[in-house]
Amino acid sequence: MANAHRKPTNVTIASSLLAEAKTLDVNLSRAAEAGIASAVAAEKARLWQEENADALASSNDFVAKSGLPLAKHRQF
């Protein structure tokens, strides 16, 4: 994402956090981008789990009832 086209935008940040970030020489654009990327990834994961909840529950039920399909071949 480092080479992605960047678009200027305005954000509202708590003044105390902004002051601390400036004191620590934090690159606000990069920090904000990293935080947004993390939030987007977390939301995508949450949505995937929500959309696939039935399949995951079915798989978990199968394993609970039958055990792992290839458990007899496990080396540990």
Image (cartoon, helix red, strand yellow):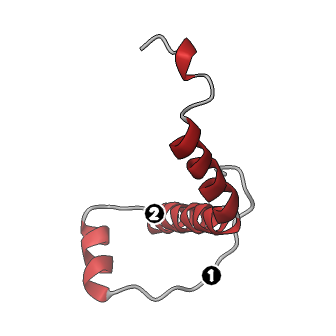
Q: Is residue 26 left or right of residue 39?
A: left
The picture places residue 38, in percent across and down from the top left corner, at: 52, 61
> At 64% across and 64% down in the image, what residue appears?
53
Q: Residues within 10 Å of mark 1 (few under 14, many from 20)?
A: few
What label does residue 63 carry, if any?
none
Residue in view at x 29 percent, y 78 percent? 17
Label placed on residue 9: 1
Upstream in sequence: badge 1 or badge 2: 1
Please, what secondary structure does the residue beneath circle 1 have?
loop
The quarter of the displayed image where residue 55 is located: bottom right
Q: Residue furthest front?
A: 65
Task: Find out whether the residues at labels 1 and 2 contact each other: C-beta distance under 8 Å.
Answer: no
Q: Quadrant of the C terminus?
A: top left
Q: Nearer the viewer, residue 39 or 28?
A: 39
Residue nearest the observer in this picture, 48 or 24 = 48
Q: How many marks?
A: 2
The residue sitting at 52% across, 85% down in the picture is 11
Position of 35 relative to 1 (above/below): below
Asked where in the image residue 40 lies, by quadrant, the reply is bottom right
Q: Nearer the viewer, residue 43 or 47?
A: 47
- Relative to residue 10, is residue 70 depicted above or below? above
Specify few, some or many for label 2: CA neighbours under 10 Å numbering under 14, 14-19, or 20 or more: few
